[in-house]
Amino acid sequence: MKVTVDRDRCIGAGNCALIAPSVFDQDPDEAVVVVLDESPPEDSRAAVQEAVDRCPAAVIALQR
């Protein structure tokens, strides 16, 4: 799986970092999403999918 984000549209809600902290974080200066692992292991799929689903700005994409 591959995770991509549109940092330009991120509103910095931080849901992704709370839901999947091994995959997402927030930039301390810009307060927007940072992808820590663009190709996370398959066992993190459920958490990544939840982060995608709960992103209020819909800036996270999950590709197979």
Image: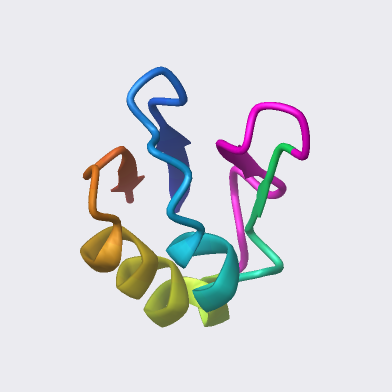
Q: Foreground residue, 14 or 60?
A: 14
Residue at the far top in the pictured view: 8
Is residue 51 rendered to the left or right of residue 32? left
Please name the residue shown 77% across and 39% down the image: 28
Relative image position of residue 50 (x, y in whole percent): 32, 74
**Where residue 55 sits in the image (x, y, percent)?**
29, 56
Which residue occupies 67% across, 69% down? 21
In the image, 37 versus 55, the foreground residue is 55
Residue ID at (76%, 29%):
29
Tell me where the magenta segment starts and ends, as one range: 28-41
Q: Which quadrant of the structure image shows residue 22?
A: bottom right
Left or right of 1 in this view: 20: right
Instruction: Give the prevailing secondary structure in the magenta stretch.
Output: loop
Which of the colour schemes (rainbow, by chain, secondary structure, one colour) is used? rainbow
- The image shows a total of numbered marks equal to 0
Is residue 60 one of those drawn in magenta? no
Residue 2: image location, x then y, percent: 46, 44
Residue closer to the observer: 36 or 10: 10
Examine the structure image and report whether residue 31 is included in the region drawn in magenta: yes
> Which residue: 44% across, 35% down?
4
Q: Position of residue 31 (x, y in %)?
A: 62, 38
Residue 8 vs 5, above or below: the answer is above
User: What is the quadrant of residue 20 in the picture?
Assistant: bottom right
